[in-house]
Image (spheres, rainbow, N blue to C red):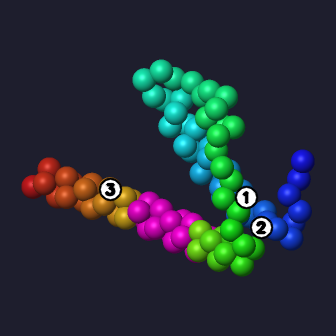
């Protein structure tokens, strides 16, 4: 069964499915691990108008870009912190 593309944005569906996947991952790590049949069947797929789906996708894309940029900055800062630590230790032990 497929949803007609005039009613949905594929990227919107992808992001929703990723969210569902994460929530199901949380269920399998609970006190009694496992995912039941109802955990999937009772999930409702939110289907807002196509214009709202597009706005959601644009916002998520923008946020994902920001996250990617922040991850790069964090990696760079870790490298700088490591070099600074080595410099401080070198300075401390060479005197």
In the rendered structure, which disc, 1 or 3, sits on the residue that comes first in sequence?
1
Question: Which residue is identified by label 3?
Answer: 82
Question: Which residue is identified by label 2?
Answer: 9
Residue farthest to the left? 95
Seen in the picture, residue 23 relative to 94 is either above or below; the reply is above
Callouts 2 and 1 close, C-beta under 8 Å: yes
- Give the x, y percent position of residue 41: 69, 37
Crowd class of label 1 (few under 14; some 14 to 19; many from 20; radius 10 Å): some
Residue at (25% x, 56% y) in the render: 85
- Give the x, y percent position of residue 78: 37, 59
- Give the x, y percent position of residue 14: 71, 56
**Which residues are drawn in magenta?**
61-76
Question: Which residue is identified by label 1?
Answer: 13
Mark 3 to mark 2 CA distance (whole Å): 44 Å
Residue at (62% x, 71% y) in the render: 56
Residue 80 within the segment the image draws in magenta: no
Residue closest to the eye, 46 or 56? 46
Residue farthest to the top? 32
Residue closest to the eye, 92 or 26? 26
């Amino acid at each position: 069964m497929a949803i007609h593309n005039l009613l949905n944005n594929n990227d919107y569906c992808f992001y929703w499915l990723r969210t569902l996947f994460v929530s199901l991952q949380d269920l399998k790590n609970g006190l009694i691990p496992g995912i039941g049949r109802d955990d999937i069947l009772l999930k409702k797929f939110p289907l807002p108008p196509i214009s709202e789906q597009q706005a959601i996708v644009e916002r998520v894309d923008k946020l994902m870009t920001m996250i990617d940029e922040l991850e790069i900055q964090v990696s760079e800062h870790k490298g700088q912190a490591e070099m600074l630590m080595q410099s401080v230790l070198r300075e401390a032990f060479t005197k």
